[in-house]
Amino acid sequence: MKALTLRDIRQSKNKNLQMLTCYDYQTAQMLNETDLDMILVGDSLGNVMLGYETTVEVTLEDMIVFGSAVRRGAPDKFLILDMPFATYSTLASGVKNASTLFQKTRAQALKLEGAYPYQLQLIERLTQNGIPVMGHIGLTPQSVHQLGGYYVHGKNEDSAARLIKEAQALEAAGAFAVVLEMVEKEVAQKITKAISIPTIGIGAGSGTDGQVLVINDLLKLGPNRPPKFCTPVADLFEMKKELIQTYLNDQRK
Ligand code: KIV
């Protein structure tokens, strides 16, 4: 299957783009054989692969290890990697760390959370340096302590207006797409109409130009209930547990 290019993605307004997270080599090999549009090595790997409470603990080295494994497993997919917490707090550190991550993992793009002026400046600089950037607004988990929890954004007029402005600013800075995480669905729809680059929603309703899910939620790889907006297609945690238990019972007969 031919990999999408940045130009294909930019031109995918209203095309129902599908993105899933992935963190390991063999899952990447499997996804490489599907017609999935984009793979995201999200810093959610901190939660689902490393057992951290938040994504704040994820490091650049973690992203390099997991990102490279996924690249090796899925050479044909458009691959996006998250810039982890505190690696882009200044323009200089952002340029340096983004270049390292991009070069060492052979990703096609990076994603960073937020749309403050210094982040917009960084996106402008990275895109000028040849590093495509996906934006991410709404719930930005790296700021969970500052936000005071995980909740839906855009619930009042001020917050909705701010999100629309942020999305427009991200487009103007050169982002090729924007993730809208836990954004009120009407607001996500308004944002989608207000910008010409694709919006990719997660917990933001069906009015975006695409969707992203954490693959561990979609396949229910863990024991916990996935977030409300994700309907798992299987319960692989229970299935795998039962298979292993059956194997153990057989061994001990
Ligand atoms: O880290 C991640 O998996 C993400 C998605 C939820 C968009 O940022």
Image (cartoon, grey):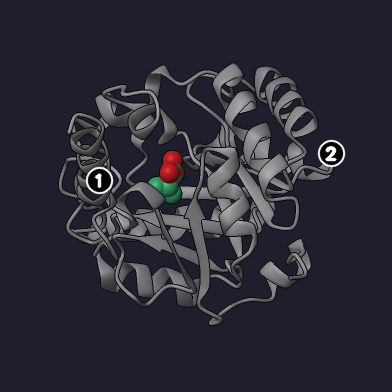
Give whichever of 92, 249 is nearer the camera.
249
| Neighbour tally class for label 2: few under 14, some 14-19, many 20 plus, Cα within 10 Å | few
Q: Quadrant of ligand 1?
A: top left
- Mark carried by residue 37: none
Report whether 4 appears left or right of 16.
Answer: right
The residue identified by callout 2 is 129
In the rendered image, the vertical position of residue 123 relative to residue 145, given as above or below: below
Q: Secondary structure at mark 1?
A: helix
Say which residue appears at 69% left-offset and 46% top-offset: 109
In the rendered image, the vertical position of residue 108 relative to residue 126, given as above or below: below
Q: Position of residue 98 (x, y in %)?
A: 70, 29
Q: Nearer the viewer, mark 2 or mark 1?
A: 1
The residue identified by callout 1 is 237
Q: Position of residue 103 (x, y in %)?
A: 80, 30
Residue type, label 2: Asn
Give whichever of 211, 135 is nearer the camera.
211
Residue type, label 1: Phe
Mark 2 vs 1, N-terminal side: 2
Q: Position of residue 213 (x, y in %)?
A: 39, 56
Q: Position of residue 134 (x, y in %)?
A: 60, 50
The quadrant where residue 33 appears: bottom right
Say which residue appears at 38% left-offset and 30% top-offset: 142
Name the residue furthest right.
129
Say which residue appears at 31% left-offset and 68% top-offset: 187
| Neighbour tally class for label 1: few under 14, some 14-19, many 20 plus, Cα within 10 Å | some
Name the residue furthest bottom.
14
The answer to whether one can see residue 214 in this image is no
Report whether 196 appears left or right of 52.
Answer: right
Report whether 236 appears left or right of 32.
Answer: left
Say which residue appears at 26% left-offset and 61% top-offset: 232
In the rendered image, the vertical position of residue 72 relative to residue 183, given as above or below: above
Q: CA distance from mark 2 to mark 1?
A: 43 Å
